[in-house]
Amino acid sequence: MKRVLLLLAIFMATATGVFAKGNLTVGQRLGTDQDTIVIKMANGAKMILQLQNIQQLKAFQNYSLDSLMRELNTYVDQVEQMGDSTSRSKDMTVTFNTSKSADGKSEQVTVTVQENDPKTGQIKKERHEIRINKNFKIDVEVEEDGDNTKVNVDVPTKAERDSTRNAHKEEHYKATRFGFDVDLGLNAFTGDAPNLIDLKAGGSRYVSLNWRLKSQVGGQKSPFHVVSGLEFAFNNYMFENNVILEEENNVTVFREVTDVNFEKSKLTQSSINLPLMASLEFKRENGHDGFTIGAGPFIGYRLGSHTKQKYDEGGRTEKDKTRDSFNLSDFQYGVEGVLGYGGIDLFAKYNMNDLFKENRGVQANVISFGFRLLY
């Protein structure tokens, strides 16, 4: 039972930093030149914690050692049986899951105890290896000499923990990953589009749902990526003037209406696109997203299109919707780019193809721009 009390005392001292029977607190001890903490146990035994700095003790605050102490009581009999054994060396590993702990955290904790058979007049040594999740390990070495107990606690430094985490990341590193993002922005016409088809800035929206296939070229620390995937884009062109689309002699024209005042008149088209973009994605020192820049071409195909007019007639709201190709170009192609910092990205997309087929409508191109939301 002495071994169990000692092990529980180690956890209590490191988890709470309390003192017993009038001794100095942890902060008072480490605030001086001394680097040891003396704790008097109820049975008169003494325990000494040797720490290099206050950061080693504070590191325990990030882990639910209180839940470990509660559940460790269920294994007291196994630990005592190990201590009563007459063999020269004793090994035991206890593994349990603290998913039902009060803090709600789920941790896999393994406690390994190794003890050499004590000899009369010699110091008895024990070594305790405590693992909390895959990246944090604590080594506790115990020396008993008569009534005195000396405990050495070896807590990994931040650099050591970061090195372990990085090794874990490299072990599960994949050069090619799937992702998803959404483009939200606006559309505008460029080229020789007449003033009659000026667009309303707020109503001419662009939305694209993007499934990405991103490959990192040059290793895990390389900023160079090649991005491909599939885009489903929706272009809305809301007209500033009171106009509708009509076909005359197999040519799409815009005609201004005078007998009806449209609350809304727009043309909408949907398309599927295949991009191929090269990008540079840098990380900041803290590992968070830094500067990003990328550009490349895309090709696509028009899936559908329709016009919609909304107006008031006789006190009722009327909506006219017409589905047709309107001589819009079926094949899409152009270039797109992205620029961002800290996970906030801006995109721009230029359709090099004319909005309408050759000699079947006004000669105009489309440019889309806005924010890219990452998921």
Image: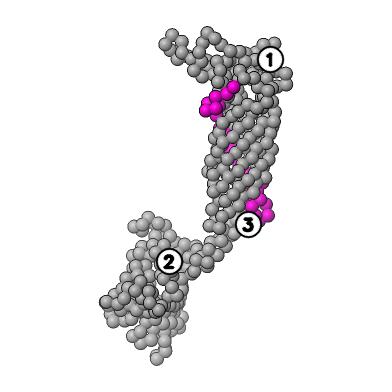
Helix, strand or loop at label 3? It is loop
Q: What kind of colouring is applied to the model shown?
A: one colour
Lower position in the chain sequence, tag 2 or tag 1: 2
Q: Is residue 138 left or right of residue 367?
A: left
> Do the residues under discs 3 and 2 have CB atoms within 8 angstroms?
no
Q: CA distance from mark 2 to mark 1?
A: 74 Å
Question: In the figure, 313 relative to 218: above or below?
Answer: above
- For label 1, the crowd category at 10 Å Cα-Cα, with few meaning under 14, some 14 to 19 and many 20 or more, is some
Give me the residue at 53% from left, 17% from top.
Answer: 309
Asked whether residue 137 is drawn in magenta, I would say: no
Q: Residue 350: x percent and y percent?
A: 65, 33
Helix, strand or loop at label 1? It is strand
Q: Residue 135: x percent and y percent?
A: 50, 63
To which residue does mark 2 refer? 59
Which image quadrant is residue 5 in?
bottom left
Q: CA distance from mark 1 to mark 3?
A: 54 Å
Q: Is residue 257 left or right of residue 148?
A: right
In the picture, the disc for residue 221 is 3
Question: In the figure, 274 relative to 88: above or below?
Answer: above
Residue type, mark 2 in image: Ala
Lower position in the chain sequence, tag 1 or tag 3: 3
Q: Is residue 140 visible?
A: no
Q: Which residues are magenta?
A: 198-227
Give me the residue at 46% from left, 13% from top.
Answer: 312
Residue type, mark 1 in image: Val
Residue type, mark 3 in image: Lys
To which residue does mark 1 refer? 251
Lower position in the chain sequence, tag 3 or tag 2: 2
